[in-house]
């Protein structure tokens, strides 16, 4: 049994929870769930390297403390957020903006919703006492201390429901913005429910106003995908370079559902993206692709858990990292095949490209198989740019950095091309190009 001593930081967080409890929406059962979640976090504290799932991302060393809860955004904060989001707006996409952890209707597009689509702020749902949806939104496992902390402190979020048989023509975009007040922590929790035979595309963008520094953002998303539904999810993390971003996603798939996801991290000083996918219905398929573009002293951790609990499902994981300077990329992928999950087809591959002698990539793929009629595999590679290809390009007159940029673009391009939506694929390509141009 591990005993965690109550540190000064632990006491400060506990005092902070007591001080802001009146600001947190939801009473009754939700208040009880918050208290239970915070008690779970207090018992564990910030994760550290002696915990296997966190051995490469020691938050006690990297973060040290949880900052006070950010205040509600005022007019000045909303103005800074509007300026920050303007270059990130995507044509033909419905935007939903969260500023400093609070839903901002004035910056969001809530008019003329498609038939079968419902969008509400989480705070509104909690204050209205909608117990069924509220309970589902807080249905994370508190054994993960950062998920528990998010459950205790979440101030707002977005609740999206897509009715049975509704296929949205317009993608949705949730934009998380740090407005640039004093260094603070922001906590959001969102819920997306797709009915039977439904379809939707969601892009999440994480960004900051020009003056935002040293903030912490903790985000959680609960996704329920109905039978025969299709969902595409794209994440673009461009937080400030001294920010912390800890994001969690919990996905449950019905029968014959299809879930595809892509994530690109080029911002935040320290980031951790942890996703759990549970196959609850037969015949479902998941495709997840990710890219880390890191330099300086950035640290980015992607941890994925595929829980194959039923037969005849398939999952594919492909992750790529480009690491420069003294940055560090972490990929942890675990596939578990339960005893009843016969005919599972699961594969995982991670590749890392190191551009500096001091760059680091830690890859930990894992398989836990308890069924005997399965097809599973994993692999991991780490290396430098191909010197012969560099020589070929430079011999044709390209400067060294431009030659490297072409090879890097080809390396990450295969993952980006998996994005089905044309507009979102172009946005991801533009994000990668900005990183490459800054390097050149």
Image (cartoon, rainbow, N blue to C red):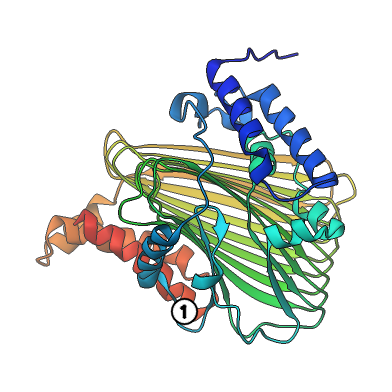
Q: Can the viewer see residue 58 in this picture? A: no
**Badge count:** 1
Q: Secondary structure at mark 1?
A: helix
Q: Residue at x 62, y 33 (%)?
A: 19
Q: Is residue 338 left or right of residue 236?
A: right
Q: Vertically, is 140 above or below 422?
A: above
Q: Can the viewer see residue 268 in this picture? A: yes
* Residue 213 spot, x, y in % from top left: 35, 44
Q: Residue at x 26, y 64 (%)?
A: 406
Other residues around mark 1 within 10 Å, as few (<14) / some (14–19) / many (≥20) = some
State the residue position of label 1. 423
* Residue 356 spot, x, y in % from top left: 26, 40
State which quadrant residue 231 falls in: bottom right
Q: Which residue is nearer to you in this view: 152 or 285?
A: 152
* Residue 136 spot, x, y in % from top left: 80, 55
Q: Is residue 364 left or right of residue 36?
A: left
Q: Which residue is nearer to you in this view: 314 or 232?
A: 232
Question: Which residue, as the protein is rendered here, is positioned at the far right?
Answer: 340
Q: Residue at x 51, y 72 (%)?
A: 106
* Residue 421 spot, x, y in % from top left: 53, 78
Q: Which residue is nearer to you in this view: 214 or 221?
A: 214
The quadrant of the image that shows the N terminus is top right
Q: Is residue 420 left or right of residue 242?
A: right
State which quadrant residue 16 falls in: top right
Question: Which residue, as the protein is rendered here, is positioned at the far left?
Answer: 397
Q: Which residue is nearer to you in this view: 128 or 87?
A: 128
Q: Vertically, is 164 above or below 104?
A: below
The quadrant of the image that shows the C terminus is bottom left
Q: Is residue 127 left or right of residue 297?
A: right
């Amino acid at each position: 049994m591990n005993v965690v001593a109550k540190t000064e930081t632990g006491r400060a967080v506990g005092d902070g929870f007591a001080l802001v409890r009146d600001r947190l929406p939801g009473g009754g059962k939700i208040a009880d769930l918050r208290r239970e979640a915070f008690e779970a976090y207090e018992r564990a504290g910030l994760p550290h390297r002696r915990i296997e799932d966190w051995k490469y991302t020691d938050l006690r060393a990297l973060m040290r403390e949880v900052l006070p809860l950010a205040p509600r955004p005022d007019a000045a904060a909303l103005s800074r957020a509007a300026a920050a989001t303007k270059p990130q707006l995507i044509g033909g996409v419905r935007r939903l903006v969260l500023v400093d952890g609070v839903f901002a209707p004035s910056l969001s597009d809530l008019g003329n919703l498609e038939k079968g689509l419902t969008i509400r702020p989480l705070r509104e749902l909690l204050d209205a006492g909608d117990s069924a949806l509220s309970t589902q939104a807080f249905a994370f496992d508190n054994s993960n201390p950062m998920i528990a902390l998010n459950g205790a402190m979440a101030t707002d979020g977005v609740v999206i429901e897509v009715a049975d048989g509704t296929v949205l023509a317009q993608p949705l975009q949730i934009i998380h913005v740090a407005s640039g007040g004093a260094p603070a922590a922001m906590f959001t929790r969102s819920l997306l429910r797709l009915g039977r035979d439904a379809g939707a595309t969601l892009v999440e963008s994480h960004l900051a106003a020009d003056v935002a520094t040293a903030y912490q953002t903790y985000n959680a998303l609960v996704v329920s995908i109905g039978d025969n539904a299709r969902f595409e999810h794209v994440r673009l993390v461009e937080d400030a370079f001294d920010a912390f971003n800890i994001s969690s996603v919990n996905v449950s798939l019905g029968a014959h559902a299809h879930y595809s996801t892509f994530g690109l991290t080029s911002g935040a000083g320290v980031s951790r993206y942890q996703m759990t996918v549970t196959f609850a219905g037969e015949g479902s398929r998941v495709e997840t692709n990710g890219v880390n573009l890191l330099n300086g002293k950035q640290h980015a951790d992607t941890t994925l858990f595929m829980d194959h609990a039923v037969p005849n499902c398939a999952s594919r994981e492909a992750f790529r990292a480009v690491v420069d300077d003294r940055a560090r990329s972490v990929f942890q992928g675990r596939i578990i095949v339960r005893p009843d999950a016969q005919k599972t087809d699961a594969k995982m591959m991670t590749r890392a490209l190191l551009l500096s002698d001091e760059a680091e990539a830690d890859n930990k793929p894992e398989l836990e198989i308890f069924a005997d009629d399965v097809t599973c595999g994993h692999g991991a590679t780490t290396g430098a740019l191909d010197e012969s290809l560099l020589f070929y390009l430079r011999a044709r007159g390209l400067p060294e950095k431009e030659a490297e940029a072409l090879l890097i673009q080809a390396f990450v391009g295969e993952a980006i091309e998996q994005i089905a939506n044309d507009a979102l694929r172009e946005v991801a390509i533009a994000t990668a190009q900005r990183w490459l141009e800054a390097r050149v």
